[in-house]
Amino acid sequence: MTQSKPTVSFEFFPPKSIAASFQLWETVQTLAPMAPEFVSVTYGAGGAIRALTRDAVAAIAAQTPLRVAAHLTCVAASRAETMQIVENYAALGVSDIVALRGDMPGGGAFAATPDGFADSCALVAALAKRGGFRIHVGAYPEPHPESRGQAADIDHLKAKFDAGATRAITQFFFEPGTFFRFRDACVRAGITQPIVPGILPIENWAGVRRMAVRCGAHVPPEFDAAFAAAARDDTGQGNGRTDLLATVLCTELCDALLAGGAEHLHFYTMNRASQTRQVCHALGVTAEVDLQKVA
């Protein structure tokens, strides 16, 4: 186990129901005492979903001491509309933006909105020109499903840094070598800015596996076998072995990343605190903030 304690950040998504709102807030309250460097809130296309993101960002910024990063995409908005959203976030005290191209509603190939940003590089450049934000961007340690290969992905990442991005956060992956190979390839390409590994704690293996297939993340065959065996052992007795396996695998991944030089870990919480909290505790990241100051 590594002796250094990492800095961490947590990602949430905006709730779409009252029950989901309570779950999000419970997750925020559970994880906030760990003093993350920042938390981020994801963003979808369309006015209603954008409003949910804005409301979640505003609530977390107003009711906690957390630094909030708002996601922003190029989908379904003109340049003027997108930059007005940026000004609205600035008015809320938001100083971090996660700038992404985004996916089209319902899937399909990306198509820029008339008078909209053509890609994430153009969005990053506009944010950098405005100033006042730390700009986070996405990175793909395994080729993006729409890419021409890893070399093209790295070229695109370098272009985002050249446009003004501050740091990159990777898509999730399951094996530390996946991150290290990507990081080293980025260094060879002349990228010097921080690349943060994105970590997806396994709350539900079947769901995580489906996400991995959709985004092109390699699924180690031994994971399938291990979770199948744990599920058999858990039959009729709760999910104790499955949960323990999930915690161990994620902790081992994070520990290897830290031992290999990573200093910050970004957790995709899926608005659930259990696995993220357990992994953080195993890494030595424990409560540092008075809960009364977070509520």
Image (tube, rainbow, N blue to C red):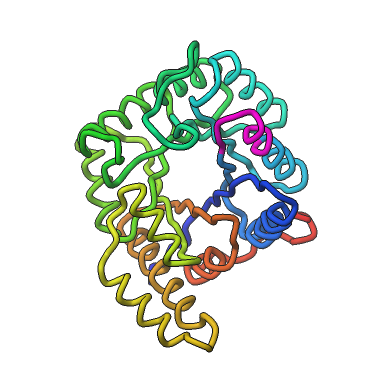
Residue found 36% across the figure and 49% down from its top: 214
User: Is residue 66 magenta-colored?
Assistant: no
Residue 150 sits in quarter: top left
State whether residue 280 is above or below residue 47: below
Residue found 56% across the figure and 37% down from its top: 43
x then y, percent, for residue 80: 58, 13
Residue 175 sits in quarter: bottom left
State whether residue 46 is above or below residue 77: below
Residue found 66% across the figure and 48% down from its top: 15
x then y, percent, for residue 263: 41, 52
x then y, percent, for residue 209: 38, 60
For the residue pair 2 and 140, the one nearer the viewer reads as: 140
Q: Residue furthest top?
A: 115
* Highlighted range, magenta: 43-53
> Is the N terminus in the top left, top right, bottom left or bottom right quadrant?
bottom left
User: Is residue 48 magenta-colored?
Assistant: yes
Dominant SS of magenta comes to: helix
For the residue pair 186 and 13, the one nearer the viewer reads as: 13
State whether residue 172 is above or below residue 207: above
